[in-house]
Amino acid sequence: MRPVPALATLPLLALLAACETPQAPTPPAPPTPPAADPAAVALQARAASLFQALPAQPVAGSNELSAARVELGKTLFFETRMSKNQELSCNSCHSLDKYGVDGKPTSTGFKGQLGGRNSPTVYNASLHLAQFWDGRAPDVEAQAKGPILNPIEMAMPDDAHVVTVLKSIPGYAPLFAAAFPGQADPISYDNMATAIGAFERSLLTPAPFDRYLGGDLSALSPEQQVGLATFMDTGCTTCHAGVTVGGQMYQKIGLVKPYDTTDMGRFDITHEESDKMVFKVPSLRNIDHTAPYFHDGKVATLDQAILLMADHQLGKQLEPAQVAQITTFLGSLTGPLPTQAIAPPTLPESGPDTPKADPT
């Protein structure tokens, strides 16, 4: 009998060796995430039926939000030479680094004069149904025209003088030409307001509440969710709903219990008896940074504003715990400020023919 060659045993030895090689352990299956609390899911669904998240991109309306137009608008927003004493700009009353307000009951204008109403924030304002407390401007573009010519605010004598000033500053010619291409004479009062409106439309502040509305239940703390429930159960959403949690309707201040004011609100615009002491409902976004409150700026704290609104608008006396809960929820409406928008631009240098400041 012939011996078996040694090589013939190699496949068998390899097979045995393979069988003896230890196998890597099978990784454990990832843990199943805990099911969301049904009550929390129901609360989020209820909120999503009343509110909407901020849009991912600015809403242009009839404007064109080109980079050149937004850049020009930002420059004009900080431009003090569009005021009679060349000391005031849009940013003076709507400070971008202070959540779009100046923190005063009413703003200080030309020669130290005080305005009649509190300056509302410009952040997210383009999403409101109208502008100003009385709604007299339909959009941010129309709103931008008002304060410049108001004798108490920036006090410029007329729109022609504003155009003269802008045309006398050499650096504005290329900025307007880029923002309004193809126009033979792009520096105009309308184009100025359109550019400022384009910039203001970019001022959105997404907040934790937006992520919550999108389905991220963890975006709100348990305490904020309790406050949200209290906010809705109390009836605050009668006026404060929609994408800006307010800003979408008009309402009489003192609807249930009279509020002490002599301001007639929209009545001064419409002359309709039903519009006496009716104002645009303010947005509650960033509300914990925009004191003082109400059209007259007489309410210093958010807690006090909540108490008064429940009393005057709903006829309800809230307990301190309820006020604290609502205040906690409202903190979820605050978003980070856009740092690029806040940084002051370098203004174009005056030309030899640029009018000087007029302090009289």
Image: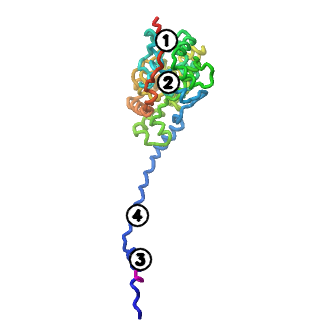
- Cα distance between the residues tagged 3 and 4: 22 Å
- Mark 3: which amino acid? Leu
Local SS, label 2? helix
| Residue where numbered disc 4 is placed | 26
Residue at 50% in and 37% down: 47
**Residue flagged by tag 4: what amino acid is it?**
Thr
Q: Position of residue 70 (x, y in %)?
A: 53, 27
Residue type at mark 2: give it: Lys
Q: Which residue is mark 3?
A: 15
The boundaries of the magenta stretch are 7-11
Figure quadrant of residue 100: top left
Tell which of 285 and 253 is nearer to you.
285
Q: Position of residue 355 (x, y in %)?
A: 50, 10
Report the residue marked by disc 2.
Answer: 74
- Ranked by sequence position, the earlier of labels 2 and 3 is 3
Looking at marks 4 and 1 on the same chain, the residue that comes earlier in the sequence is marked by: 4
Q: Label 1, on which residue?
A: 352
Q: CA distance from mark 1 to mark 2?
A: 24 Å
Judging depth in this view, the residue of 104 and 58 nearest the camera is 58
Residue at the bottom extreme of this rendering:
1
